[in-house]
Each structure stands twice: as structure tokens, then as C-alpha cells.
Amino acid sequence: MDCIFCKIRDGEIPKEFTYEDKDVMVFPDINPIRPTHLLIVSKKHIRDFLDVDEDSLAKMTKILKKMIKETGLEKKGYRIGINGGGAQIISHLHIHLMGPWSKHEI
Ligand code: AMP
Ligand code: ZN
């Protein structure tokens, strides 16, 4: 399967992780739109948000919360996003964490 995030997971594409455990990896978006722009990525290849199981989503959510706190975005303002249904560029489930994001922009 020609999936860039699977290749990152498998070490075929070198990537410095911000966080990693057996289920989830986090790294900066290569094309950031905010000073902080992280991708929280399931290690399991999940094609679309509609295909995600509760367990995988819970694991991603737990790490997402941890990243919001560790980056300081908890107080600065943040936005989270998932593209799906063909709006995504990479069909391997990931959550964008972006910030700071002032309230009037949200
Ligand atoms: P989307 O699938 O629409 O959520 O967008 C995929 C995101 O992955 C984009 O914001 C890209 O900038 C980002 N991206 C693509 N390739 C890489 C990479 N090798 N490392 C980090 N981020 C990437
Ligand atoms: Zn994949």
C-alpha cells in the first residue's frame, strides 16, 4: 500500500516524532499553517474518520489532549480538525492540532 503515513510509521520515511507510543504517533505538519501545527496520527491504517473504531479514537483523543497541554495551546487557543470524505489529502486517519488561534478566528 502506497501510504505516506504508513511509511513514516514503518521508518521507511525518516521522521522525528514529537510523541510516540504503540498506537499513536505525533509529528509536525510539513506545511504548517500556524506556529504550532501537529498531526496526531493513528498507527493503524484507518482510511477515513467514518471507519474509526472507538478504541483507536479514544487513544488518539487521549494523546491530543496531552499535546494541547504540552504545547501551551490550552491557554493560547487552538483548533482541531479532521478532513474526510475525500477532502483529505492523505487517507490515513490523523487529527490536525493548530494554534495559537484567537477566538475571533475560530
Ligand atoms: P489532509 O489529509 O487534508 O488532512 O492533509 C494532510 C496533511 O499532511 C497536510 O497538512 C500536509 O502538509 C501534511 N503532510 C504531508 N506529508 C507530510 C509529511 N511527510 N510529514 C508531515 N506532514 C505531512
Ligand atoms: Zn497508512
Image (cartoon, grey):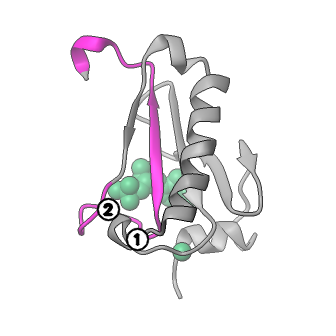
Range shown magenta: 83-105
Location of mark 2 (residue): 88
Question: From the viewer's perspective, is 89 left or right of 93?
Answer: left
- x%, y% of residue 22? 76, 63
Q: Nearer the viewer, residue 39 or 35?
A: 39
Q: Nearer the viewer, residue 1 or 13?
A: 1
Location of mark 1 (residue): 91
**Dot 2: within a 10 Å radius of its alpha carbon, few (fewer than 14), some, or many (20 or more) residues?**
some
* Quadrant housing residue 48: bottom left
Look at 57% across and 34% down and name the residue there.
Answer: 65
The answer to whether the residue bearing label 2 lies less than 8 angstroms from the nearest atom of ligand 1 is yes
Q: Please say if the residues under marks 2 and 1 sit with CB atoms less than 8 Å apart.
A: yes
SS for tag 1? loop
Secondary structure mostly seen in the magenta stretch: loop
100 versus 7 height, above or below: above
- x%, y% of residue 74? 53, 18
SS for tag 2? loop
